[in-house]
Structures are given as structure tokens and as C-alpha cells.
Amino acid sequence: MSKFTVLLIWLSSLSFLGYGIGYFISPKLQEEFKRFGLAKFGPLTGALEILGAVGLLVGLWVPLILLLASGGLTLLMLLGFGVRLKIKDGFWASLPSFLFMLLNAYIFYEVLQVYL
């Protein structure tokens, strides 16, 4: 795996760790889920973000975990982007979920190329 891909894995992992933990400690992030009409899914989303972040790092040594974590985070961000579109959030509000979807899709693709 290239150093560039490893750097992207760290970037994604630290970002999702921050967002996941942030949900549990930031009333602002919890309010966002209420605004989306998805308040009951907030804790699950936060937990999945934390698990995905840890999975990306563990996956540096266990490729199957990296594949599952990057695939799961890709799907999570696809759904997040869909929610942003559905509630008609603007371009800038929707951009992070789209970019993190692409980032994790790239990691997923790279893992497939290297290990399968």
C-alpha cells in the first residue's frame, strides 16, 4: 500500500474519530440530527463513525478490517450525502459528506487492488 493511501487512511480515521466522539459531547451535532429528522439515529451514527475510524487503523495490519471499515464509511457518507440533498442543504454543507464518501471509496478500491 502506498504512503499516500496510508496518509489518507489516517486523515479519514482521525476525522471520523473526531466526528463520532463529537456527536456524544456536542449538543450542536445532536441538534443537527434533530434537524435532519433522524434524532434516534444519532447515537448509532456516532458509534459507527468511531468503529469505522478504529477499523481503518486496525486495517493497516488486517486488510479485511480495512476493507470493511472503508466500505462501511463509504456507505455511511453516501447516506449522509443523501440526507443533505433531501433536506436541501446547500453545497458547502453537503460537500464534506460527499468528499468523505469519495475518500473512503478510494481507500476501499486501493485495498481491493493491493490485497485481493
Image (spheres, helix red, strand yellow):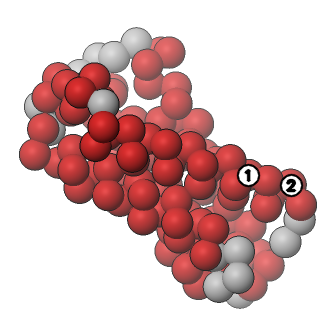
Which residue type does callout 1 highlight? Leu
Q: Mark 1 points at which residue?
A: 8
- Judge whether 84 appears above or below 6 on screen: above
User: What residue appears at the point 61 percent right and 75 percent down from the top-left corner?
Assistant: 58
Task: Tell me if 103 is positioned left or right of 54 in this view.
Answer: right
The label shown at residue 63 is: none
Distance (Cα) linking label 2 and label 1: 6 Å
Q: Residue at x 51, y 36 (%)?
A: 98
Amino acid carrying mark 2 in the image: Phe
Determine which residue is flagged by label 2: 4
Secondary element at image label 1 = helix
Q: What element carries label 2?
A: helix
Q: Quadrant of residue 110?
A: bottom right
Instruction: Spot the residue most to the right.
Output: 3
**Mark 2 touching mark 1, by CB under 8 A?**
yes
Left or right side of 90 for 112: right
Is residue 25 visible to the viewer in this orientation of the structure? Answer: yes
Q: Nearer the viewer, residue 30 or 82?
A: 30
Residue at the image point whose x is 84% and y is 72% from the top: 1
